[in-house]
Structures are given as structure tokens and as C-alpha cells.
Image (cartoon, grey):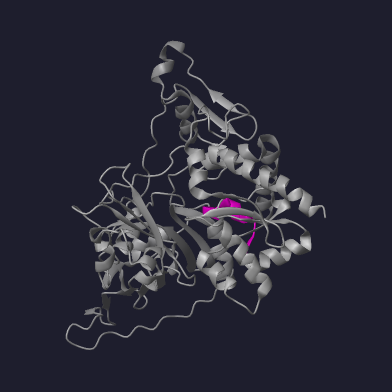
Amino acid sequence: MSATAALIVFLQQEVALKALGTEGLFLFSSLDTDHDLYLSPEEFKLVAEKLTGSPPAFFCTLTHSNPKYSIPTNPTRMLTNRISPPADFEEEVTHDRNGETLTLEAKMQPLQLDTMTKSKDGFLGVTHSSLSGLRSWQSPAVSSMSFSASQFRAFLPPKNKGEVGDTWWVIQSELNIFTGYLPNNRYHPPAPRGKEVLIHSLLSMFHPRPFIKSRFAPQGTVACIRAASDFYLDIVFRIHAEFQLNDVPDFPFWFTPGQFTGNIVLSRDSSHVRQFTLYVPNDRTLNVDMEWLYGATENSNMEVDIGYLPQMELRAAGPSTPSFIQDEEGNIIDSRGGGSDPVQFVFEDIHWTSEISREEAARRLEVTFYPFKKVSYLPFSEAFQQAQEESETVHLSPVLALLNQSFVSSWSLVKELEDMQANEQNPVESQRARLHLEKYNFPVEMMVALPNGTIVHHINANYFLDQTSMKPEEEAATFSFSGGFEDPSTATYINFLKEGLEKAKEHLAQ
């Protein structure tokens, strides 16, 4: 994106924020799936269905300014002019038998059961059948698989995303404030189509039942151009997907890595793949969420836990190569050997003409999945150091970061806080960690803390979800649509932040 284009987008967002407010802009952004600052009829249909309980009888497209309405000229036909779903223009990614072949190798080390919370009491109360799929999953389903290089064109950017640093959805998330989450009581994933086929095939090397669209947000696959040359692109990607480890008669068991990430270096026409990696990051003490049901219905009791997966990765055995080549006399030669020594290929060096760091590309992917990540989330210790310098409160939460000017944001795993608490070499950090652990309840606790570590306000994720799942007219609901069309999560979260600021005022004034 050019500097001029970036400035235009920034100014549009500033105008939108002033016109709609924080809550309104969040609502608009959650519906604007292609991020063009314009609600198409298909995008607006979700709003109409939420309000009327049925698809809209007229076309209504909204932008941040100058709303445009197109109403059928014949009133008697108004009810029949309903918005039809858009045609599926997504190209099916097919295998090119005459092209180059890329071989991927899968490696995996199983989840360490002793890192699960339930392991501390010997999995007391957990039925053997619940963990059967997890215990038996010790290695990849397929250790090696060959792909056509052309299949990886699924990772190529769309025509309007050609600059280094640009991000785009390879597989679009279908979750927003109206769709909620996908059902838990499933065993087999839906048939993939279009670009989903490649992602499904890749993840199937680990386990035969990958769900490439996770039940909860974040969902989908996002890619970013890290580097570019005249003929090649280095594309970094991030995938949020999960596996179903159990099959009937056992009840469902969901295995959800924190993320899959990796990169691919390929030619702009996808005829050649120079490099490919895909893996689950293992740099945190815990990196997998697990949930399993104790019944066959959606309302069955569910257990949740977290754990550590040491390794899950795909890596190309080498660059893609043609299966057959012609010699100087026009003879067809099997490059794989066919009874003689295989052909040795020499590949030219790639000289990037434009690039960003891998860390910057990863940050842009994260912001695409989590727009609130535009607010920096600092490590635990750094957050309190900055809070002391700026006399601001510390907000620890994996969800929306609002009121940027009043908070320093951070997040931490319980295991990391326990390690900090046990560190006698740093008593100040140990004390802060202890204060947070005292207020923590499973699975996630959102907290507002003073620079000295004192917790002034906190809310558990389960209570938060209960509040946001209520209808506005219910007595215990903490939000309503009376003051505007608000997302329940946003309304509840704003109340939480405002209450935290009020409770912190007397301390910050000292």
C-alpha cells in the first residue's frame, strides 16, 4: 500500500470513529468482512435478519457517510426482491500433473499429558474414553505427501494486495457478533472447497479430522507478503483450525492449537515452490486448548483444559521439481532416477527487492485477526514498568483493548505467573504475580491493576460470556440496545473498563 493510500484509509477510519463512536465502529467493522469501509447488500443482510428475523425485502447498502438506498420501484413486488446469496467465484485449486512436485514431511511429538491441569489430580473424574483419541495420537497420520506446486497458488495474494506488508484472508472468517460460534457436537468436518482444499490436505497430514474453520473466533487463514522480487514472493501465513480426536461411540474431543503459522516462498505464477514450512509455535509454556463433551448433544456438560505440544510441523523436503525433463536432444528423462541416479537440480539465488522482518509480518497477521492488537500488549514485567512511568492502570485481557490513552495492556499464562511468584530474586515481580494469581479463576480472568500490582477490578471469562449471551430485555443483562445498536460483548466490556477506571481514580490521584 502506498503512503497516499495508507493516509486515505487512516483519515477514513478517523472520520468513521467520530461519526459512529467506538462501539459503532466496532459493530461496523465486524460486519465489513472485506474491510473496504463499505457494507455491501450481502454484508448488511446480517443486520436486517437480526432486526427483522428474516432476510431483507429491499437492498440497503451503508457506508460511513452518504448512505445509499436502492428500493424496488414497484411496491407490489417489494417482498419478492430479496437478496440472494452471491455466486461462488472461488476458483477450485486443482492438481497439475505436468507441473512441478513438492514433497512435504510431517513431524510431531504428542501432547505432554503432565502439562494438563487435570493431570495434577491424576485425571480424577475424567473418563478413559474421553481421552482415548488424545492418548492414541502419537504420530502424524501421514509422514510424507507430495503436492503439485500449482496447488499452492491458494496462498497467492488477490490482485489488490500486491505490496510487501499487505495482508488478506485466504480463508475468510465466518464468525461475527451475530453468528456466535459453531456447534460442538460434531465428529467429521464439512467437505472443503476452493482454497480450503489445500489447507485441509495439509492439516490432514497430522490427523484425519481437521476442521479448518474453528468453532470460536479467531477463525480462518490470513496471509501477508513478507518479501518480494521480480519473480518470487515470500508469504507468511497464520491458520486458526482444530482437530476432532474422538469418533463414535466416544463423545467429541476438540484439540485446538493456539495457532498454526509458517511461510512459503513461491514464484508469482505458482509454478515453483522454493520453500514451505507450517508449524504450531512452541515458545510458550502452554499452546493447546482442549474441550470434550460428556454427552452427545450441544447442551451436554463440557470439560476444558490446556496443555503443551512440543512439536507439530510440516516442512518441504526441498524445492519443487519437475517429474520429467527434456535433455538437449529432446528426450524425456525421469528426473527422479528411474533406475539411474536422480537428476541434481541447481536453483538460482533469490534477491529480494523489498521486504519486512518476519516479526513485522507476524504482527500484521495478528492485527488482521485481532484489530484490538493495534494497541500494544506488553510482557507482564514491561507493562508494569511502563504503567509506573505513565501513571496508568494495567489491563490484562485477551479481548478488546479500549480506552488506549488510559491503559497499558498485557496478558500472561498462569504457569508464567506461577514461575514469577516463585522467583525470589525479583521480589517486586513476585509480589505482583501473587496479587494476580489470588484473583485468578479458571479459565481466563480479565483484570485492571494499578502500577504496583494491586487489582482494582476483575471479571471472569465465563461470567463475561454469560452476560453477553443474555438478551437485552432480560433482567440481569448488563447491556441494552436503547442507546444504540451495540454488540453485547462490546457493551459489557466497556462497562468493565469504565468501572475499573472509576475504582482506580483515587489511587492514581495520589
Instruction: Decide: is 256 above or below 110.
Output: above
Figure check: 426 above or below 375: below
Side of 205 relative to 74 (left or right) = left
Which residue shows up at 27% across the image and 71% down it? 138
Q: Is residue 370 left or right of residue 258?
A: right
Q: Is residue 16 visible?
A: yes
Quarter of the picture holding the N terminus? bottom right
Q: Nearer the viewer, residue 485 or 34?
A: 485
Viewed as shown, does residue 281 lie left or right of 192? right
Q: Nearer the viewer, residue 262 or 326?
A: 262
Question: In this view of the protein, can residue 166 be seen by the observer?
Answer: no
x, y (%) of residue 498? 68, 43
Work out which quarter of the rendered image holds the C terminus and state it: bottom right
Front in this rendered view, residue 152 or 112: 112
Q: Which residues are magenta?
A: 368-378
Q: Quadrant of residue 258?
A: bottom left
At horizontal 44% and vertical 48% (from top left) the residue drawn is: 173
Residue 442 coordinates in the image, percent (x, y): 48, 56
- In the rendered image, residue 369 lying in the magenta stretch gets the answer yes
The residue lying furthest to the right in this view is 510
Q: Residue at x 52, y 26 (%)?
A: 473
Quick check: 370 above or below 433? above
